[in-house]
Structures are given as structure tokens and as C-alpha cells.
Amino acid sequence: MAVRVRQTYIQHQPELPEQQHEQIQEHKPQLKKAAKFFTPGEKFLFIILAVVVASFAISILHTQGEIQTVSMEIQSIEREITEVNNNNVDLKVRVSELSTHERIWEKAKELGLTLNEKNVKVVPGE
């Protein structure tokens, strides 16, 4: 905009003799060559913003990685719990099969034990 104003000012000036024209040019302040797009302060703020955004991105990625690791551990533990529960059920079935009265009588006969009703004591069960 300053260039346009200067151009219109130069076009509307009356012609001066060369000596006066040279004197006027000597007294004119020199203009800056080119305007910078960003000041050093703005550049610093952009760098700070980039660092903050990068640190947030890194922290989010780190958190997501930890969440994934914990999720995998949870699935592994759940699988182990399922296996242990299945094993417990199998063992309970086996205990109930092995603790039947018929089986106990068979084992007792194999070992040579006999039933003496005078020595039998009744113990309350579970």
C-alpha cells in the first residue's frame, strides 16, 4: 500500500530541476528492503506451539501403547481364569465320582476291611 501511495505521489509531483531532485533523494529515508512475514516473537511462538503439539501427540501414543499392553494382559489373565475354572469343575466332578458309597465299599473290601456296626460313628457332612 505504501508503494502505491508513493507511486501516485511521484506521478503528481511537478518536474523539478535535477539538482533539486537529487537533493530531495538524498534526504529521503531508505525503505526496508522486504517486509518479513513473521517476527522473531511469532516464530518463537510457532516453535513453542509445535513442541506442545508434538509432546501431546507423543503422550497420547504412549498412553495408547500402555492401554494396549494392559488390555493384552487382561485377556491373558481372563484366559487363565477360564482354564482354572474349567479345571475346578472337572476336579469337582471327579471328587463326586470318587466319593460314592459303592466305590468306597469296593476299596474297603479290596483292603480287607469289614463293617462292624459297633465301631461306626456318624460324622455330620458338609
Image (spheres, rainbow, N blue to C red):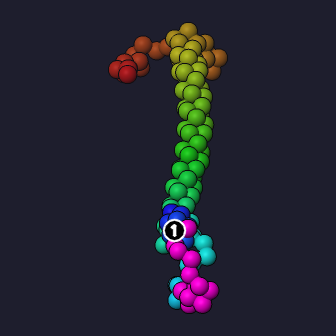
Residue 55 percent coordinates (x, y): 54, 59
Q: Is residue 14 magenta?
A: yes
Q: Is residue 40 visible?
A: no
Seen from the viewer's position, the closer of residues 106 and 80 is 80
Seen from the viewer's position, the closer of residues 16 and 69 is 16
Residue 2 percent coordinates (x, y): 50, 67
**In the current view of this chain or complex, which residue is farthest to the top?**
102
Q: Is residue 28 above or below residue 52?
A: below
Seen from the viewer's position, the closer of residues 92 and 63 is 63
Residue 86 percent coordinates (x, y): 58, 23
For the record, the magenta segment spans 11-25
**In the current view of this chain or complex, which residue is farthest to the right?**
110
Quadrant in which residue 104 is drawn: top right
State the SS at label 1. helix
Judging by the rendered image, the residue that carries numbered circle 1 is 12
- Where does the C terminus fall, quadrant-wise? top left
